[in-house]
Image (cartoon, helix red, strand yellow):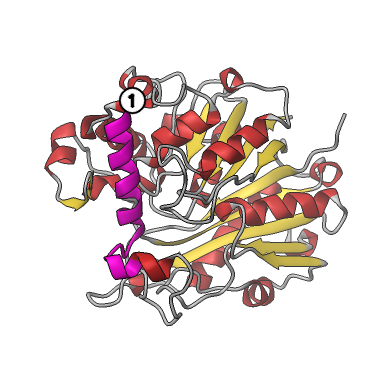
Amino acid sequence: MTMKATITGVGMSNIGRKTNRPAMAHLVEAAKRAMETAGLTKDDIDGISTYPGKTDNSPGMSPLGTGEVRNALGLKTRWHGAIPDGPSQMGPIMVAAMAVLTGQARHVLCFRALTESSSQTATRRASIAGAGKARMDGWLSYLVPANAMSASNWAGWMAMRYFHEFGMTREHLGMVATGERAFAQLNPMAVMQSPMTMEDYLEARMISSPLGLFDCDIPIDGACVVIVSAADAAKDCAREPLVIEAMGAALGSQETWDQRTDLTTMGAHDSCADMWKRTDMKPTDIDVLALYDGFSIFVPYWLEAFGFCGHGEAKDFIAEGNIGPGGRFPVNTGGGQLSGGRLHGFGLLHEACTQLWGDAGARQVTNAQTAVCGMGGGFIAGSMLLRKD
């Protein structure tokens, strides 16, 4: 049997909006929780990885690099890396898996830390092109002059095209948003806890048509840590290791949001197709879905990319109640990024692992054995399949 990398621990800080806590305080808290979950100490960690590395091109987006985290935690590492580009926000976890498979490290601490919420002011916004110090180039240099300043604009035109092609409506996306809010109410760590009805969703202000306020994820302060371990090293950990059964990061289009031949697909479709080639498992074998929801429209794209329904069929799949509480394929059971808070996919993977270990409390999916996680939007995509050993 082919040796697989594993996940042995996850940890999340006490996230929130405008916490005014230093990013390092969040990171240390998340790292301690992850190591406690795994039954490891700092002396066991010999690798460190992050996305995207320390950067000042957007306020609070990525304030910590591997060096200062390594020093703060007192780590002595044999391997380290930061992944600014490549297979989505999942990149540091993917390369960590490859590192342990090739003997570069035994236990790799992968982290994501943000202070986006505290860093925002009325004139200085995170995740907006030109908000930082970096000069704009590449595809941003021709989107921004057209006033497409934000990913909400780029996702909005994808949604408009999908609506036109397949008859999806705002009510279908409302089912995504209200379903995730229902899950968030069962998650004490989620940022948005108040109930949300379809009326609440439809009456919220428009952001970038057809996407409204509740179609957009929530900027927060917080950190999340995932520990990737070699299979033989994982045997001595506190929890049953979660096997990384397969990964995919293929991309068959240009690295732009607007030039893909079919705007009703994303890079997700390429990465998922590649992932399924690496396993004998099928979509019908999956119990828990962690799907990137920087915007609600990404969820139907990921559902189709992973093969849970056919191209153009996501609206009916969602309307049938498949993805919400009690559904056959529950999506983002911790509230996702729409209601749980934006950790750029790390929080989604944290929730998937929590479900597989049976630690999800009131939102626990019965007998969860397998999960898929897809991170990224537009051309950015990484896919992962996890199973209990």
Decide whether residue 162 is among the magenta residues. yes
Pinpoint residue 335: horizontal percent, then vertical percent: 38, 40
Q: Residue at x 66, y 52 (%)?
A: 93
Q: Residue at x 42, y 67 (%)?
A: 140
User: On the picture, is 388 further left or further right than 99?
Assistant: left
Q: Against 189, is 47 above or below?
A: below
Q: Against 243, is 86 above or below?
A: below
Q: Specify few, some or many for label 1: CA neighbours under 10 Å numbering under 14, 14-19, or 20 or more.
A: many
Nearest the camera: 208 or 184?
208
Q: Amino acid at mark 1?
A: Lys
Q: How many marks?
A: 1
> Can I make out residue 36 in this image?
yes
Q: Quadrant of residue 306?
A: top right
Q: Quadrant of residue 358?
A: top right
Main secondary structure of the magenta stretch = helix
User: On the picture, is 30 further left or further right than 211?
Assistant: right
Q: Against 191, is 330 above or below?
A: above
Work out which quarter of the rendered image holds the C terminus and state it: top right
Q: Residue at x 45, y 65 (%)?
A: 139
Pinpoint residue 177: horizontal percent, then vertical percent: 29, 38
Helix, strand or loop at disc 1?
helix
> Can I make out residue 192 in this image?
no
Work out which quarter of the rendered image holds the N terminus and state it: top right
Q: Against 263, is 138 above or below?
A: below
Pinpoint residue 127: horizontal percent, then vertical percent: 38, 65
Q: Residue at x 66, y 30 (%)?
A: 276
Nearest the camera: 378 or 231?
378
Decide whether residue 335 is among the magenta residues. no
Q: Quadrant of residue 29?
A: bottom right
What span is colored magenta in the figure?
A: 144-165
- Which residue is labeled 1 in the image? 315
